[in-house]
């Protein structure tokens, strides 16, 4: 392999404290809905979230300090809605702090509809919807936990579905994706390129 050039050299980052606020990383932004003890539904934004493997599993990072963790553990279900760039405000509203009585008044501006298979709601204005039954919760990542769900139902807007006859570059330009640039920024992904996979590559 070629030796490292003398252009820009990496700078060591101390791991005595969490490193993630020292640079930007790209993540999805999803809205996780879970059922509260009083029967209402909470919606919370998550960016440490992704498919888990190639099968129908989805996971996100949470903490026992948040209501979402306890709601999912108690009801063994949650839903996931993927906002579009023009609905990024949904993520902001769902991140609003709770009042002293535990309410989130800002959620009154977030329109939802009932899930089809789990006891939950999904958020209007999004393009991809997942309904999940709890598979397991893995605690012990410092103050955080990994919540893993098995996808039992999924739906998407027609414009978000990949089809053989549709040019993917044109599709994403017409219906861009929302990305969260942690910490604290977001982007609209509209310009894309095919990845240069090597010949013979497979999952």
Image: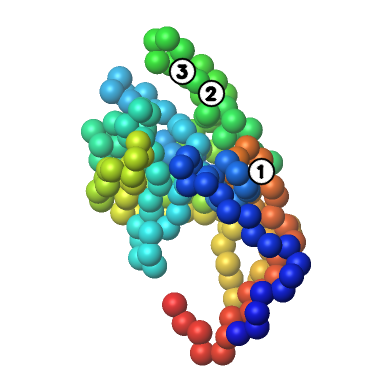
- 70 vs 5, left or right, is left
36 to 18, vertically: above or below: above
Picture disc at residue 96 = 2
First reached walking from the N terminus: tag 1 or tag 3: 3
Q: Is residue 52 left or right of residue 99?
A: left
Query: Are the residues flagged by discs 1 and 3 in contact, CB closer than 8 Å?
Result: no
Residue 192 in picture, x, y percent from top left = 71, 65
In the rendered structure, find residue 46 and report the number of the disc placed on it.
none
Disc number for residue 186: 1
Q: How is the image coloured?
A: rainbow
Q: Classify residue 43 by image quadrant.
A: top left
Residue 28 lies, in percent from the top left, at 55, 50
- Cα separation between marks 2 and 1: 17 Å
Q: Is residue 170 left or right of residue 15?
A: right
Label 3 neighbourhood size at 10 Å, few (<14), some (14-19), many (20+)?
Answer: few
7 or 119, which lies in front? 7
Tags 2 and 3 in contact by the CB under 8 Å rule? yes
Looking at the rendering, in which quadrant would you find the N terminus? bottom right
Q: Is residue 104 above or below residue 167?
A: above
* Of the pair 152 and 200, the residue shown nearer to us: 200
Report if residue 188 is visible in the image: yes
Look at 45% across and 54% down and name the residue there.
50
SS at mark 2 in the image: loop
Ranked by sequence position, the earlier of labels 2 and 1 is 2
Which labelled disc corresponds to residue 98? 3
**Which residue is found at the position 53% from the left and 29% from the top?**
95
* In front of the other: 13 or 171: 13
Q: Residue furthest bottom?
A: 200
């Amino acid at each position: 392999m070629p030796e490292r050039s003398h252009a820009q050299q990496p700078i060591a980052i101390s791991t005595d404290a969490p490193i993630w606020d020292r640079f930007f990383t790209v993540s999805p932004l999803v809205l996780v809905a879970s059922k509260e003890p009083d029967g209402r539904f909470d919606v919370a934004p998550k960016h440490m979230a992704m498919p888990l493997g190639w099968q129908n599993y989805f996971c996100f990072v949470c903490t026992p300090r948040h209501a979402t963790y306890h709601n999912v553990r108690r009801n063994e279900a949650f839903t996931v809605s993927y906002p579009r760039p023009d609905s990024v405000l949904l993520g902001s509203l769902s991140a609003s702090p709770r009042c002293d009585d535990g309410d989130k008044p800002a959620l009154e501006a977030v329109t939802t509809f009932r899930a089809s298979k789990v006891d939950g709601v999904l958020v209007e204005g999004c393009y991809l919807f997942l309904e999940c039954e709890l598979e397991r919760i893995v605690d012990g990542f410092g103050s955080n936990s990994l919540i893993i769900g098995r996808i039992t139902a999924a739906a998407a807007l027609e414009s978000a579905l990949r089809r053989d006859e549709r040019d993917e570059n044109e599709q994403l330009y017409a219906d861009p994706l929302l990305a969260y640039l942690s910490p604290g920024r977001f982007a609209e992904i509209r310009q894309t390129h095919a990845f240069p996979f090597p010949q013979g590559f497979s999952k």
